[in-house]
Image: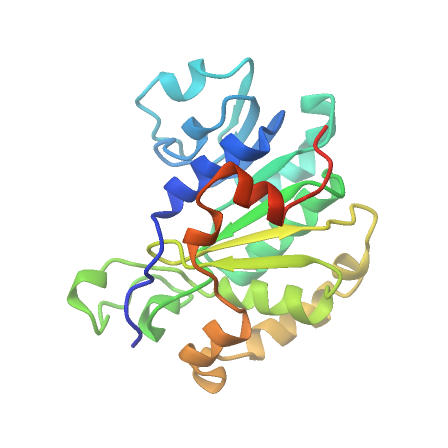
Amino acid sequence: MLPDLAGDPYRTVLARLHAALKPKTYFEIGTLGGATLGLAKCSSVAVDPRFGIKDTGVILNKPTCLLFQQTSDDFFAANKLTDLFGANVDFAFLDGMHKCEFLLRDFINTERQSHKNTMIVLHDCIPTEIPMTGRDGIDGKAEAPHRRGWWTGDVWRTLWALMQFRPDLSITALDAKPTGLILITNLHPTSTRLSNQYPEIEKAMLEATLSDIGIENWQALIKVESTGNYASDDQILAKFAFDRH
């Protein structure tokens, strides 16, 4: 068991990214009550099998907002974000099903409809203890009582796979409470490596174990940084110094 992550809450960090990067198009998987969707002020598309949005301001603060109440696999099978937006995705937050193969497919499908300067953000990839990483939900055996109910699933394996199979990506890991944020840039929408090797990658992901890696070693391996390094527009833009459009 590791101490709780020390950074700012993940929604605070997402709000800073929206403010600094000023995306024109935003895509989200895993909306629930809409707290993260509400941070976007631009044209947005959100996917969730069952929405729980009660605050209409989540929708009304945008020029357009499309909600698709279905799984992400079904969404991508029937829709193209580039058609819905009339443009590529500028900023995406992937927080859907907490199983590594689902998140990998979500990343593959989102990257295809992005551009080089898109930022894709992953949630829950920095667990602080092993019990919260189970594939079948909460096992009720969290070592820290205040963490009971926390479930990251095994999406840390998706990050592991991206590091192994896509070293061309620029990956930044932040200690955002409670279970981290992963910022991915330098995307290549025409890349087919992940899709072409999907069976091999899925097998490798499922064979990787956090117990073997070591949960503390995992944080060192992904080079977790403080959210304090990204507390202002200037700090964010200095790090992600690509041309915005």
Q: Is residue 106 visible?
A: yes
Rendered location of residue 116, percent (x, y)? 76, 43
Q: Is residue 150 above or below residue 239?
A: below
Rendered location of residue 235, percent (x, y)? 53, 45
Q: Tell me the colour scheme of the image.
A: rainbow
Identify the residue at horizontal 34%, vertical 61% (top origin): 137
Instruction: In this rendered view, identify the residue nearer to me: 146 or 79.
Output: 146
Rendered location of residue 9, percent (x, y)? 34, 48
* 3 left or right of 220 in image: left
Residue 14 quadrant? top left
* 153 left or right of 68 in image: left
Q: Is residue 93 visible?
A: no
Q: Is residue 242 above or below residue 99?
A: above
Farthest left residue?
A: 145
The quarter of the image holding the C terminus is top right
Marks counted in the figure total: 0
The quarter of the image holding the N terminus is bottom left
Identify the residue at horizontal 50%, vertical 31% (top origin): 19
Residue 83 quadrant? top right
Identify the residue at horizontal 56%, vertical 25% (top origin): 44
Rendered location of residue 109, percent (x, y)? 69, 45
Farthest bottom residue?
A: 212
Instruction: In this rendered view, identify the residue nearer to me: 80 or 71.
Output: 80
Q: Is residue 55 above or below residue 103?
A: above
Instruction: In this rendered view, identify the residue nearer to me: 15 or 132.
Output: 15
Identify the residue at horizontal 57%, vertical 58% (top origin): 172
Instruction: In this rendered view, identify the residue nearer to me: 64 or 116.
Output: 116
